[in-house]
Image: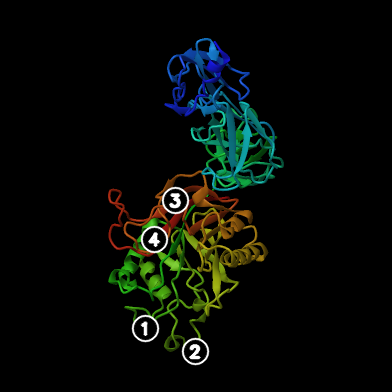
Amino acid sequence: MPAAQAAALAKPTGVTVTEINFESFVFRWKPVAGATSYTGKLATNAKFTKGVQHFKTSKSTRKPIRLKNCTTYYFKVRANKGSASGSYSAVKKVTLDCFWPREFSTIKVVPKSGTSIALKWKKPQYATRFEIWRSTERDFSANLVKVKTSKDWYLDTNFKASKPGKSYFYRILAFNKSNTKNVRYSPKLEANLKTSVPQGLKVVGTSPNGATLSWNTAWNARQYEVRAATDTGFTTNVKTLKTTDGSNRLTFNTLGSGKKYYFQVRAVNGVKENVVRSTYSATVYGATLRAGVPLTVMSFNVKSAKYDDGVSSRRWNNRKPAIASTIAGSGADVVGVQEAYASDNYPGGDGVTPQWEDLRRTLAPKGYQRALTGTDGVYSYSQCKKDGCWKDEYKLDGNHIFYKTATVKPIGKGGSISLPNPDNRGSGYTASWQVFEKRDGSGVRFAAVDTHLYSSGITKRGVYEDRRTAQVKAILSTLKNNAELADLPVVLLGDLNSHGGHKPVSTFLAGGFADTAGLDVPQTKANFNSSHGFQNPPPSTFGTQIDYVLVSKDVAVKKWELVANIDPKTGKFVGTIPSDHHAIKAVVTLPR
């Protein structure tokens, strides 16, 4: 063909791309005058040296086949007339849609060391690259770290061992090449570092049915598992307990009396999945005391008679019989009450009889008397013929100890502990105490302590928590240094205005006490909050106790009960609501 004829063929123009999907697309261009056919080139690079396809067509459109998803293709076309061809059009490129990566099927999380975690997964179909997310929160709201990789494994070494341990959370994102829209997320994964083996396990105290153990905190441990058995192989009478708050102290309370037990502890890191456990520590042993003497105790905040909120059912005279029935019906040997104040100025009162004296008179026919009986029945000037005969009771700040006369008897006069007074209350803050002896012929003696801590900012913590903690330290100091109380088993009753994880409670625990509500013993109505504010039905949101029965390490615990007359079907109180707090009762065993 003459050159002039070939030159007359123009470059194709108006090249467009339509119908793009995962595996194909359609190219179109404007017909060229005089052209009898078209030749095209398709490639995966702009130089047309890779993945090249050639085609020839008489139409001004083309749909290439056998293409790959998520791939960029380059296309150009020229016109032909006979054997002559014109110049190629401008290059056009198009990227096919990407298939979604398939779902993750297998992901393994392996703690490699105390400072590294390995992840390995089966690469989902169509996934070509990955992004690893790591956070200290399950919802990835804090300390988020992102790492990109094309491998199907990742070794995360960006850790430091810590005390206590903490969980990390991972998520793997799968992408198909550079596409960032069609991303596949793996499930959220909890991962944990290896723990060290706890050291320094020792038996710090035993009771007739229990033993208290402590150990040094281990690296990366969030909890600990302690096991007990009567043989060194841990096959006989095995019992395992787990701390729930990372504490390095734990008390067994359902062991056999007068037996030798062996103990081991191991560290645990994790909450729900991929939980890591160390090997067990070296074995230690200790012997429980011989069968002890039973005792039932109660703590009860009876609410000040001065405040009835204008509701007749909350008036002291209406609540008083229900309070007395709760105490007498419990069979408690010793009861610590709070808020039984010295005031005689309350709705329905006679203007002469203090609240505590009114309660004493009500309980006396039921077999109960009040300890520290300095002015029982004598509280006014006309009775004692001098000013201030009520001051001792006023300074008790409403904390009174009642006892069942048939089962225990007071030894000595007892006393009170003056506590720090952060808000300069006129009556101050106190803890009442009394030594008692069982009337069963055993001669066993014990001390009962009753207190009501500073009440402001119960949930705010900070400075408020510190003020209550200072009061706790004053109580612990007196118990340690008072000769009348030293070496005696102690039951501590009170409204601590603190939740279980707060410093006032943890300070008591560190000082050698155990919380009867947190031990391995049968519990009744543990779902109810100890303070209910006269709500009916009362709230039942676990973990918001502020009323406690604590025991020293040589006292075993048999049962714990929140005492309340509640209809199991409706969850509501039956009859008069005695107070804005539930009574707390514990059955314990004193060492002989």
Res. 168 visible in picture: no
For this rendering, which residue is in front, 339 or 157? 157
Q: What element carries label 3?
A: loop
In the image, residue 507 lies at what x, y percent?
Answer: 61, 58
Q: Which numbered circle lies on residue 542? A: 3
Counting residues from the N terminus, which is met first, the one under dot 1 or under dot 4? 1
Tell me the distance, in whole angstroms, between the alpha carbons under discs 2 and 3. Answer: 50 Å
Q: Nearer the viewer, residue 354 or 94?
A: 94
Verify CB contact (< 8 Å) between mark 2 and mark 1.
no
Give how far apart the Cα atoms at labels 3 and 4 are.
13 Å
User: From the viewer's perspective, is the residue at label 2 or at label 1 nearer?
Assistant: 1
Q: First in sequence, mark 1 or 3: give its number.
A: 1
In-image side of 328 versus 280 (left or right): left
Q: Which residue in the protein does label 4 denote?
A: 532
Residue under label 1: 351
**Residue matched to label 2:** 386
Q: Left or right? Give the position of 20 relative to 280.
A: left
How far apart marks 1 and 3 lie (CA) works out to 41 Å
The answer to whether marks 1 and 4 mark residues whose Cβ atoms lie closer than 8 Å is no
Q: Estimate how packed mark 3 is, as few (under 14), some (14 to 19) or many (20 or more) residues with alpha carbons within 10 Å.
A: few
**Position above or below: 220 against 317:** above
